[in-house]
Image (spheres, rainbow, N blue to C red):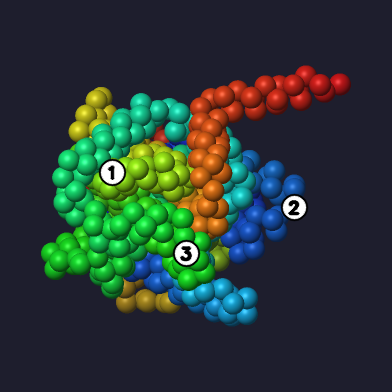
Amino acid sequence: MGAPILRSYRFRRERQSSWLELETLMNRAEADGLQSLDSDQLSRLPVLYRAALSSLSVARAISLDKNVVSYLTSLAIRAYAFVYGTRHSLRSSIGGFFLDQYPSLVWSMRLWVAAAMITLGLGVAGGFALTERNPDAFYSLVSEEMAGGRSPLSTDEELLEVLESPDDQRLDSLGAFASFLFTHNARIGLSCFTIGIAGGIPVVALVFANGLTLGAFAAIHATRDLGFEFWAWVLPHGVTELLAVCLCAAAGMKLGAALLFPGRRRRLDALVIEGRRAANVVLGTIPLFLLAALIEGFFRQLMLDETIRYLVAAATALGWLIYFTPVSRKWRASRLRDEWDDRP
Amino acid sequence: MSERSLSVLTPEMVRLDVELAEPGARLGAFLIDVVIVTVTGTILTLIAAWFFDALGIGDAAFAALAMLLWFVLRNFYFIGFELGWRGRTPGKKVSSIRVIAADGGALTADQIYARNLTREIELFLPLIALAAPHLLLPEAPVWVWIATGSWTLFLGLLPVVGRHSARLGDLVAGTAVIQDPKDSLRHDVSAEHTGAGRTKKGSYSFTDQQLDLYGAHELQVLEDILRRHSEKPNPELLVLITEKIVRKIGWHQHSRDVDTERFLRAFYAAQRGRLEHHLVLGQRREHKVK
């Protein structure tokens, strides 16, 4: 008497051709990429994947063949990575990110950005007031490296020279200066994000301290009636750069707040959700820092006219305002709608 | 389920037990990627140096460009590949590991950004701080060096000691790095019994009482043994197992008198049929009756 064929074996015999078909596709796709599959095979892929998943569910319920279950699990995982892996190219994802996601992400946390800006503003005001009352405070507020030879003891001419000197020797050090500023500020931005994980309070302190430095600089210029020239020197790139610092700080503060007051979420979950959001904010500031460093390193040293410097500052401010507020997205959405309506 | 596996629920609500990547495989993949980035970066830097020299642009501007280049390269290498290659970089491909969303959902672009940007904070900045503290903080006191050192060490060890062997970036992004599974579909052990190899010599049959003594675990151990036997015959082991089974189920013949391989295959098929019958009725027995 022959042993009857097992039900689980019959099940396997009926389904295994689709499993093997999926396996062949996966082998191809893993070795040569999805583009090596033709359109028929591509459209088969999700179907075969779901068939394999359903086979797996059934096999778990009826089969004790360990190999079949582990094979199906492994096949399902491989296909899962293809069906649910990302399918963005770097370019399209960056494009979509900067056109859509980033401005709305920043807009959604505008209160935090405002809080960071106020903190920075308080820092500037504090640094200004301290240095104006007691010029020696400058030394404790500004590191030697940042000061670049300027101090309350500098003469008016020395200060003015830094603000308006175009000479070639400086031009050579511009790049280094730009890179220093890029790394310096990007570092402040990144630190804001990182120490946001430590509860957000250090971020506030850091932004405030940054404001103090700026305020101290402003004060030593203002006391000699060079305030107008100083801000013309700072603002063209400062608008962009300080905005970027504030965005990073806002992300860090929000992260810290999520950690301290997770609400109904678990702390780790809150950290994960806000961390992802904050990382995106920080990512988006990289071009801002870069633009600021370029303006600072090249444009500012080549354009000495104060009016133009102020115009540039105003233009960048207006540009960022349009970019980050919903104005631009409304405008774009309406344009898309028009295009849609215009279709025959 | 072992320590090193993770249960994810696919959007189709099917649970998949995935095997997490070994820390060694992850380190290997990372080192390969670092080598690629370093070599590419060095070549690009040299080309840029030659170019700048020809144009007569100063060293400082070149230094700025080089810093930017390395920053962009080391970040967008990982991000670009993980986006385009579905969670894999060249290093990961060599090590057969990949990134998936730890909750079983679709892996999104912002998860990839988050897990890779965190690396900048988690590894590269501390490494720069260790190698050249003055670049990050002028006049860095010793404690900064010690602090960044222990920070790097802690984060570096996180995948080894932590749950899910996740690094900080994985925790922040909600991703997991898994081993690519490679099980292949093999012959059904019960089919080999019922298949062409069967002789007319009669087959072994078992009563339900005899089959109710073992559970799924023993069945699958037997499956492994039989599979390994067909690759690399090991008659002594089969005799040993047969003796055990004959004693346990009270088989009427002496173990000397049975054809061990055919006996075990028949027993496997009958046992699996019996257990699967129970399984369909909702009774899963994992272990044998003592």
Q: Earlier in the sequence, mark 2 or mark 1?
A: 2
Q: Residues within 10 Å of mark 3 (few under 14, many from 20)?
A: many
- Crowd class of label 1 (few under 14; some 14 to 19; many from 20; radius 10 Å): few
Residue at 62% across, 80% down: B54
> Label 2, label 3: how many angstroms apart (C-alpha)?
53 Å
Q: Is residue A49 above or below residue B259?
A: above
Give the crowd class for mark 2: few <14, some 14-19, many >=20 residues within 10 Å: few
Residue for point 43% across, 70% down: B34
Q: Quadrant of residue A20?
A: bottom right
Q: Quadrant of residue B196?
A: bottom right
**Residue A151, can we see it?**
yes
| Mark carried by residue A171 | none
- Residue located beneath label 3 in the image: A174
Q: Earlier in the sequence, mark 2 or mark 3?
A: 2
Does residue B58 lie above or below B215 as drawn? below
Q: Where's residue A164, x and y in %?
A: 46, 55
**Mark 2 and mark 1: span between their CA atoms?**
73 Å
Q: Which label belongs to residue A223?
A: 1
Q: Residue at x 14, y 68 (%)?
A: B142
For numbered disc 1, what is the local secondary structure? loop
What's the mark number on residue A38? Answer: 2
Q: Chain of mark 3?
A: A
Which chain letter goes with mark 2? A
Say whether disc 1 or disc 3 marks the residue closer to the N-terminus: 3
Front tag of 2 and 3: 3
Q: Image quarter for residue A208?
A: top left
Disc 2, SS: loop
In-image side of B62 versus B247 (left or right): right
